[in-house]
């Protein structure tokens, strides 16, 4: 990340003053945030709070990718979009919303599928990848790219009133394939909008911690939130030596 030459102007200092006050953040931390590029995979339930709070925090460049269109059933949780956006490409309303949140942030939207042949171009120049997807086959593509490049990946998933978050960075942590060797069947899963909000905010916070170098990341830990019980649990996770992506079988 090239941030040394970035000097926040007075308006930026005022805009971000409350987070600059956080111990260990300061102006230098804000320079790092402002000089960063983040790739957000998905502009739905998780991608909405993730990208909104990254934009609000002043991340310099957000690269956002989504192939879908806005449906009425999305609107209980996908707060980048509104009823007037129905049937439109999600990426269009998402980019417009983020530019309203913070016009100083450079937002690039990609109406494209994430696949083995496209991921490198979509995530080009990124400092960190954020998984806001809802299917494991595409998550595996993002995971393999993270392992291949050494880029950190924040993974999260939600269902009903529960969610999970972890921070992946090869070779220090297990990759996503270590944790989930087989993709679960695709289904229409239940989801309360606030659940995606809570878990998406945790993803955004992990990304900001990484960018500023502040705090302990969820490395080798899977954080599980049970909203119905209002309870957090934590599981230690380990690398699978036989993982086909990051282990001996990776080739």
Image: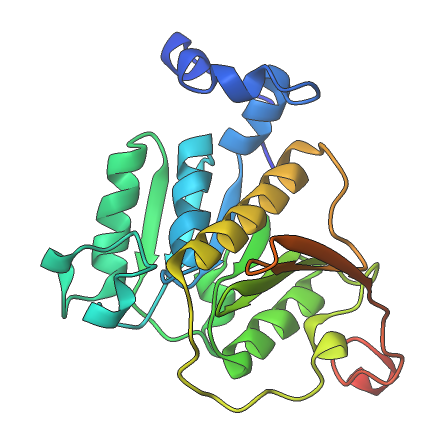
* Furthest residue toward top: 10
Q: Is residue 176 visible?
A: yes
Q: Position of residue 181 (x, y in %)?
A: 71, 85
- Of the 4 image quadrants, the one containing the C terminus is bottom right
Q: Is residue 71 visible?
A: no
- From the viewer's perspective, tell me whether residue 89 is left or right of residue 121: left
Location of residue 242 by image quarter: bottom right
At x 42% / y 69%, what residue is drawn? 191
At x 21% / y 54%, what residue is drawn? 93
- From the viewer's perspective, tell me whether residue 74 is left or right of residue 235: left
Q: In this rendering, is residue 67 above or below 98?
A: below
Q: Position of residue 183 (x, y in %)?
A: 60, 87
- From the viewer's perspective, tell me whether residue 120 is left or right of residue 63: right
State the scheme by which the image is colored: rainbow
At x 80% / y 82%, what residue is drawn? 243
Q: In this rendering, is residue 47 above or below 25?
A: below
Q: Which of 42/82 is in front?
A: 82
Q: Which of 48/4 is in front?
A: 48
Q: Position of residue 158 (x, y in %)?
A: 52, 67
Please tell me how many numbered marks the rendered image carries: 0
* Furthest residue toward left: 84
Q: In this rendering, is residue 178 above or below 36?
A: below
* Furthest residue toward front: 229
Q: Which of 64/79 is in front?
A: 79
- From the viewer's perspective, tell me whether residue 197 is left or right of residue 169: left
Q: Which of 98/86 is in front?
A: 86
At x 69% / y 69%, what residue is drawn? 148
- Of the 4 image quadrants, the one containing the N terminus is top right
Q: Position of residue 49 (x, y in %)?
A: 42, 49
* Furthest residue toward bottom: 185
């Amino acid at each position: 990340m090239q941030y040394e030459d970035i000097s926040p102007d007075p308006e930026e200092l005022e805009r971000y003053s409350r987070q600059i006050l956080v111990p260990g953040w300061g102006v230098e931390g804000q320079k790092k945030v402002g000089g960063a590029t983040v790739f957000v995979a998905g502009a739905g339930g998780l991608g909405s709070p993730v990208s909104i709070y990254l934009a609000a925090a002043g991340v310099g460049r957000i690269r956002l990718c989504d192939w879908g269109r806005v449906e009425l059933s999305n609107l209980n949780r996908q707060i980048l979009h509104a009823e007037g956006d129905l049937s439109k490409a999600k990426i269009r309303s998402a980019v417009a919303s983020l530019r309203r949140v913070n016009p100083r942030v450079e937002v690039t939207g990609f109406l494209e599928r994430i696949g083995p042949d496209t991921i490198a171009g979509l995530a080009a120049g990124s400092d960190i990848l954020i998984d806001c997807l809802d299917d494991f086959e595409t998550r595996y593509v993002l995971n393999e790219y993270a392992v291949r490049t050494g880029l950190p990946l924040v993974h999260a998933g939600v269902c009903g009133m529960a969610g999970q978050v972890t921070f992946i960075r090869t070779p220090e942590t297990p990759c996503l394939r270590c944790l989930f060797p087989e993709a679960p069947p695709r289904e229409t899963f239940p989801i309360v909008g606030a659940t995606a909000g809570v878990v998406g905010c945790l993803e955004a916070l992990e990304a900001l911690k990484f960018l500023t170098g502040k705090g302990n990341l969820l490395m080798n830990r899977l954080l599980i939130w049970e909203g119905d019980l209002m309870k957090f649990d934590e599981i230690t996770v380990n690398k699978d030596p036989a993982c086909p992506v990051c282990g001996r079988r990776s080739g």
